[in-house]
Amino acid sequence: MNESREGELIGLGRELAEASEPGFFEHRTQAILAERFRARGFKVREFSGMTGFLAGTGGSRQAQRLAVVADMDALPQPGASSPGSVGAYAHTCGHHLQMTALFGAACLLRERHPKLAARVAFLATPAEEYVELERREALRREGRVRALSGKQELLQRGAFAGFQVVVATHAASPRPGEVSSVLAMNGFEVLRWSFRGASAHAGAHPHRGRNAQNAAVLFLQARAFLRESFPEDRHVRIHPVLRLPPDQPVNLIPETAAVETYVRAVDPETVEGTARRLEAAAAGCSTAIGVEVGAERLSGYAPFRADPRLHALLRQTVEARGLRFVEEPFSAASSDMGDVSQLKPAIIVGLPGTNGLLHEGGFRVTGEREAYVLPAELLADYLKRLLTQP
């Protein structure tokens, strides 16, 4: 890759990092990335009623047999004054790396192998992070989307129907020159509980109240006691947060409290069994304190399973380029690529160039060429190998 192209990709990565936006609201991000594709002569088809687009060289949809996807959304940052404020979101999961690799690989493949490029669809997909669900539920009530994540929505719209293979990337290894592939990931569901008691003056007559916060805290303790009963090979992860009304005064018994959590595990059966035990614990704790409790479930993501053939070919591609390949047997994290992988052969290519502190405020790009240029070259090479395999 020449110096001019390298500079273009590094500049794009920086620009996308600054345009961090929440899921289903990636308007500036989409404008930046789609314009880059159009300037390079790609045809861009935007999705109706939501962010995200499909870019191609202009060939027929029937000819596009392979899809490459990149996530566009960023994560909310704790402590931001409001969802729309400056610095409220940041790419602490490296989605700007994915988008840069998507664009770079598309350009390289088209320049070097135009006939092969005609068989690839390049998808910029919204809303991979399963957060700020209230905003997404509002979009669903408006009829703009049916699902709460980007790829789940595109699956419902049939956008993946014609593809034989789906390739994704993700920031992964903090070590230079290392590319990984995860073989499996957890699935999850979202569970919410609303505890309701009665308020009273916390100093003068607390006995008149029924403390919803106490019930929620007791439930969190019960959840902790359940931990030892989870088999290690099921990779159960429960990470709840407790919420009180933002205007809850310290001298008033809390009338309401809420607990929200993911329940992650290696298979849907374990997720379901764990969810039922938590629901029973919440009911018991509310009864003990004398408050009411309501429960709600939201579908999360299916477990991810990498296709063995795609995994093996990635290893060959990485090692042929003199890079180190790392096979990651399992990750307890989750992605909506899990839903895709249940229907299509799929893979997630783990990229270098960052410190690996995913979702943390300290996440940083440590090498711009490794983060933005190397992934584009690797991905273009990998796509060529995929498209020329017998």
Image (spheres, rainbow, N blue to C red):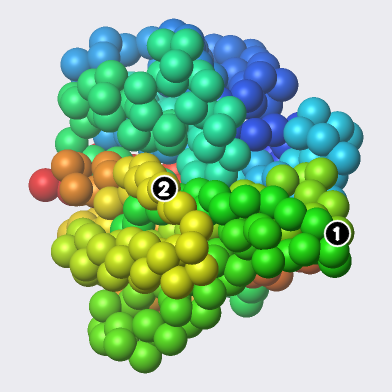
Amino acid type, mark 2 = Gly
For the point 52% across and 28% down, which residue is it?
Answer: 136
Q: Is residue 375 above or below residue 278?
A: above
Mark 1 closeness class: few <14, some 14–19, many ≥20 residues within 10 Å: few
Q: Is residue 109 above or below residue 297?
A: above
What element does badge 2 sit on?
strand
295 or 224: which is nearer to us?
A: 295
Mark 2 closeness class: few <14, some 14–19, many ≥20 residues within 10 Å: some
Residue 285: % across, % down: 44, 70
165 or 382: which is nearer to us?
A: 165
177 or 285: which is nearer to us?
A: 285
- Left or right: 364 as drawn, with respect to 97: right
Residue 223: % across, % down: 44, 76
- Left or right: 375 as drawn, with respect to 74: left
Amino acid type, mark 1 = Asn
146 or 2: which is nearer to us?
A: 146
Q: Does residue 33 show up?
A: no
- Left or right: 20 as drawn, with respect to 298: right
Residue at the far left: name it: 390
Q: CA distance from mark 2 to mark 1?
A: 25 Å
Query: In the image, which disc is placed on residue 69?
Result: none
What element does badge 1 sit on?
loop
First reached walking from the N terminus: tag 2 or tag 1: 1
Give the residue pinned by disc 1: 251
Q: Is residue 81 above or below residue 37?
A: below
Residue 154: % across, % down: 34, 26
Name the quarter where the N terminus is drawn. top right
Give the residue pinned by disc 2: 294
For the point 33% across and 77% down, which residue is it?
Answer: 235
For the point 45% across and 53% down, which residue is it?
Answer: 292
Residue 299: % across, % down: 33, 44
